[in-house]
Amino acid sequence: MEVPRALVQVAQRARRVVVLTGAGMSAESGLSTFRDPENGLWQRFSAQHLASAAAWDEDPALVWAWYVWRFECVGEVQPNAGHDAIARWSERTDLAVVTQNVDNLHERAGTRSVVHLHGSISAFRCSACERPHAETPVLPDEPVERLAPPRCATCAGLIRPGVVWFGETLPDRAWVDAVAKVSEADLVLVVGTSGIVYPAAGLPAIARSEGAVVVEINPQTTDISDMADLSWRETAARALPALVDAVHDGECP
Ligand code: BJW
Ligand code: ZN
């Protein structure tokens, strides 16, 4: 596969690299994106009814069942060649992943520096007292529409998924780390995100204003495309291994 020459050059020279990822990063592992017009999660399920605090307040059992199903899906899939390539690159370069994804596929591929902007689908906490809940959810034999969430051992509050819903603020530490990392980066690769959801969608502009080169890897045009220095219309699992091979080919062993 032909890797854009300008990208190989900038990637070889970059001392600090940030890879900002969205749902498209995990699509080739078999996880649905949110906004794909045919198969996206939002085509099949209503965002307002599942990914908001209002939905949780109205029908926690509906929301809990949906997240338990997605938690199970994440456990059934594997990191793809794109996750593996990023992990390989991170062994030789100062590289951090900043992800909007709630899966753990970057970590499972071996990348150590991963910032989760929208939380994690395998972290649970009490919706009342905020204490972490370490127990793995009990999975039903078949997908169900409603499932009663477990209760907190301390205050009997309902246990909720540790993800960030619409209208909720991002975890402070994650946001501060993400802004610091993109501000210090020479190259920010934006992979598999529609660039619609803020504040994460503002990170490429912050990076650019601080001097980084911004390169998008996405088969489709997105809200980031106009401001990116380069858009490579490829998928994550095809583009990233080719890029990392090309970067390492030019290095001393
Ligand atoms: C491939 C590929 C392949 C396919 N290879 N690429 C009005 C009212 C209230 C709030 C707002 C408002 N206006 C704006 C806001 C703020 C709101 C927001 O941005 N809304 C927009 C939709 C307008 N943001 C928030 O509320 C955030 N909090 C916040 O701002 O706090 C301050 C505040 C508080 C109160 C009021 C107002 C402000 C929180 C956002 C939380 C987002 N949460 C979710 C769910 C997480 C949990 C879960 O997983 O269920 O995060 S929503 C969902 O979207 C998820 C994702 O992380 C996020 C981004 O989606 P992503 O990753 O970009 O996926 P897609 O599907 O959109 O795109 C996939 C891309 O991949 C496509 O481009 C494909 O082409 C590509 N692709 N295959 C590479 N193989
Ligand atoms: Zn509690």
Image (cartoon, rainbow, N blue to C red):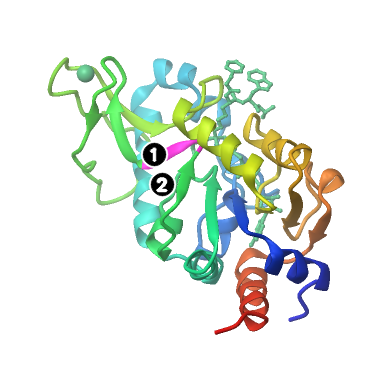
Quadrant of the snapshot with the N terminus: bottom right
- Marks 2 and 1: CB-CB under 8 Å? yes
Residue at 40% across, 64% down: 110
**Main SS of the magenta segment?**
strand
Residue 29 in the image, given as x and y percentages of width and height: 50, 64
**Residue hosting label 1:** 67
Image coordinates for residue 166, horizontal then vertical, percent: 55, 25
Q: Is residue 51 magenta?
A: no
User: Total label count?
Assistant: 2
Mark 2 residue CB less than 8 A from any atom of ligand 1: yes
Q: Determine whether the residue tagged by mark 2 lies in a helix, strand or loop.
A: helix
Judge the density around disc 2: few (<14), some (14-19), many (≥20) Cα neighbours within 10 Å.
Answer: some
Q: Quadrant of residue 43?
A: top right
Can you identify the residue that label 2 sits on?
A: 70
Q: Which residues are magenta?
A: 117-121
Residue at image location 62% in from the left, 73% down from the top: 244
Q: Note whether 55 is above or below 201 in the view shown.
A: above
Could you tell me the amino acid type at mark 1? Tyr
- Magenta span contains residue 118: yes
The residue nearer to you, when weighing 235 against 91, is 91
Whole-Å distance between the Cαs marked 2 and 1? 5 Å
Q: Within the image, what quadrant is residue 233 found in?
A: bottom right
Task: Identify the element where label 1 is drawn.
Answer: helix
Identify the mark at residue 44; answer none if there is no mark.
none
Q: Position of residue 124 (x, y in %)?
A: 30, 34
Q: Position of residue 82 (x, y in %)?
A: 56, 67
Q: Is ligand 1 within 8 Å of the beta carbon of the residue shown at mark 1?
A: yes
Apparent side of residue 237 relative to residue 108 in the rendered image (left or right): right
Q: Is residue 98 left or right of residue 59?
A: right
